[in-house]
Amino acid sequence: MYSLQPDFWHLLSPELVLVAFGMLFLLSPP
Amino acid sequence: MKADEKFKTAIGWLSLAGFGITLVLVLQVLVGLQGGSAAALVSQDGPALVMDSFSQLFKAICLLGAMLGVLVSFKYLKVNKAFTGEYFTFVTFAVFGMMVMASGTDLLTLWVGLETMALSVYVLAAYLRRHPASVEGAVKYSCWGPSPRASTSTACRSSTAPRGRSTCERSPRS
């Protein structure tokens, strides 16, 4: 159905970095 | 300042750094496009996630807004005794949803972006849970929020269903 283009990782690198930072905060203790 | 508060403040600054790095990457993609556009994700109906100058501009605006928002919320959260590290996660995921929406050209991609943003904003609306105005705002948002979203999706669906396609891009055949 949906197919990734060859430069997917380069084009979506900003979003991926943002999600990575979001996941780091989820690991923080309350 | 207690060690716990120092740690939470560090998380806030770390989120600001994350927004900064993302902004640099957005500008890097913008320069790499050289005024053109490139699809990152393609469905059977056509492109679903498209990077172009317009989408990158809106991503930069969202990121700058989030950075300003995080900067002013340090003191606000401390004054209202709601300073937690998770706050910055919600802001981050709300901005992620906005960025997906900025690039989305397919109804499903737009929908996923809208929902990712909305879920985080629902939590942020009720963030000061001991503050009556915050709770009232969250209740009103959760009551009235879905109705315009549902009507928007119905309008989008009825406008694209006759063509049998979910993408917003113009078909070469039509």
Image: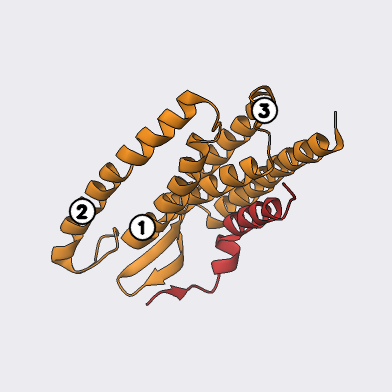
Tell me the mark number nearer the camera, choosing from 3 and 2: 3
N-terminal label among 3 and 2: 3
Q: Nearer the viewer, mark 1 or mark 3?
A: 3
Indicate left or right for B54 with B70 as reference: left
Amino acid type, residue under disc 3 in the picture: Lys
- Upstream in sequence: badge 1 or badge 2: 1
Chain ID for label 3? Answer: B
The colour assigned to chain B within the rendered structure: orange
B89 up-or-down from B76: above or below = below
Q: Position of residue A6 (x, y in %)?
A: 54, 74
Q: Could you tell me which quadrant the N terminus of chain A lies in?
A: bottom left
Q: Is residue B105 visible?
A: yes
SS at mark 1 in the image? loop
| Residue to which mark 2 is pinned | B154
**Which residue sits at x=66%, y=57%?**
A20
**Which residue position is annotated with label 1?**
B105
Chain for numbered disc 1: B
* Letter of the chain that mark 2 sits on in the rendering: B
Image coords of residue B94 (percent x, y): 52, 46
Q: Which chain is red?
A: A
* Badge 2 amino acid: Thr
Residue at the location (64% across, 49% down)?
Answer: B22
Ranked by sequence position, the earlier of labels 1 and 3 is 3
Q: Please tell me in which quadrant of the rendered image residue B171 appears.
A: bottom left
Q: Secondary structure at mark 3?
A: loop
Q: Determine if residue B174 is in view.
A: no
Alpha-carbon span between mark 3 and mark 2: 41 Å
Spatial CA distance of label 1 from label 3 is 41 Å
Q: Are marks 3 and 2 on the same chain?
A: yes
Q: Amino acid at mark 1?
A: Thr
Residue hosting label 3: B81
- Rendered view: A5 above or below B107: below
